[in-house]
Image (tube, rainbow, N blue to C red):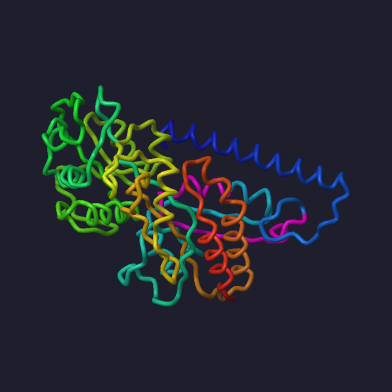
Amino acid sequence: MHPDREAYLVNRNVLSRRLLAGVALAALALTGCGSNDNGKEPGASGGDSAYANLSGELKASGASFPDAYYQEVVEAFKGEASGVTVTYNATGSGTGKKQFGEGLVDFAGTDSLVKESDGVAVGSFLYIPTVAAPITVSYNLQGVDKLQLSPETLAKIFQTDIKTWNDEAIKADNPGVELPDTPIVVAHRSDGSGTTSNFTKYLEAASGGAWKLGSGDTVAWPASTQGGEKNTGVAQIVQQTSGAVGYVDLSDAKATGLKFAAIKNKDGQFVEPTLDGTTAGLEGAEIADDLSYNPLNAAGATSYPITAPTFIIVKTSYSDAAKAELVKGFLTYLLNDGQDLAKEIDFAPLPASLKEKALAQVDKIQS
């Protein structure tokens, strides 16, 4: 693990422990005031929490894009359900879906929708939306602290049609900025990735036909580009390589100390990747009946255009009733208390209406 990332994770866990300590103190204060409220809903804090009697183990794998958030929720959940062990292994969306289809994990994280080739039977799973976050276009270019890129220029950079940072197209996006003739090194995911799927879907939708490589968890990148495993691998290539550019989730980009570009949105405004811009993108997204949704290239002057959703996929029915209760308990916590943790680590919580639909989806899980 990169030392910057390791330090970041340590700081997150300190925040979690402080949060849990505050919850415990609040619960004691309520007890001291003679509270007799025993009708707590799932997600309530304290010793009589609906999660306190849960026990067992949950194994999950999948998207690295939301990994920082899921690890934070897992850590906080320990304080509510000390008898439950939840393990989430950030393997990438493609591997997570494959392992879920093979029955190797209890649930999987994915930033892309399930396809027939993923090995997950139609009708055997449900989508549970969890959070959303911007995909940054992170870069390493000495002396350039502010960078703007239109989707057409971005597409040409990532398919290596544009080869140096002082190309006329990049200059046109950045009037008055002194751009060096440094060669561009494109960094991308080497593993099957929902981040890749969302990034390439955005380029396909927004670049006016400039993007020629298609979209999906994997695409045929030019031979001159460099691949890194997980978001952290791409972040490290960008950090260590002069002239590099890559697509990285905001949490990992910040943890690695990367600079990232403002991207021209559908309304013609250059917008930096922020949680406010992500929330604006979510508000313009259309929600399908299965709770899949696409906030990419959303309209709105303040919308960040490369806003990616992420989901957990669960079985419609678990043969083990206790396992079903564990899955439902953890996801109920994630969608209630867990949403309050999202902004601390650069993820946007779900809008209230989508959160309620997600909780109703969890209730559909059978045993």
Q: Reply above or below: 337 against 104.
A: above
Horizontal and vertical percent position of residue 54 = 68, 61
Image quadrant in which you'd find residue 287? bottom left
Q: Which quadrant, please, contains the N terminus?
A: top left
- The magenta span reads 48-74
Query: Camera-side residue: 170 or 71?
Result: 170
Residue 367 is left or right of residue 163, and the answer is right
Q: Is residue 357 magenta?
A: no
- Please, is residue 144 above or below residue 300 in the view? above
Would you say residue 69 sits in the magenta stretch? yes
Residue 122 placed where, x, y %?
Answer: 39, 76
Q: Nearer the viewer, residue 339 or 14?
A: 339
The residue that appears at 41% across and 35% down in the rendered structure is: 254
Residue at 56% x, 51% y is 339
Q: Position of residue 67 (x, y in %)?
A: 46, 48
Taking the image as shown, residue 86 lies to the left or right of residue 191, namely right
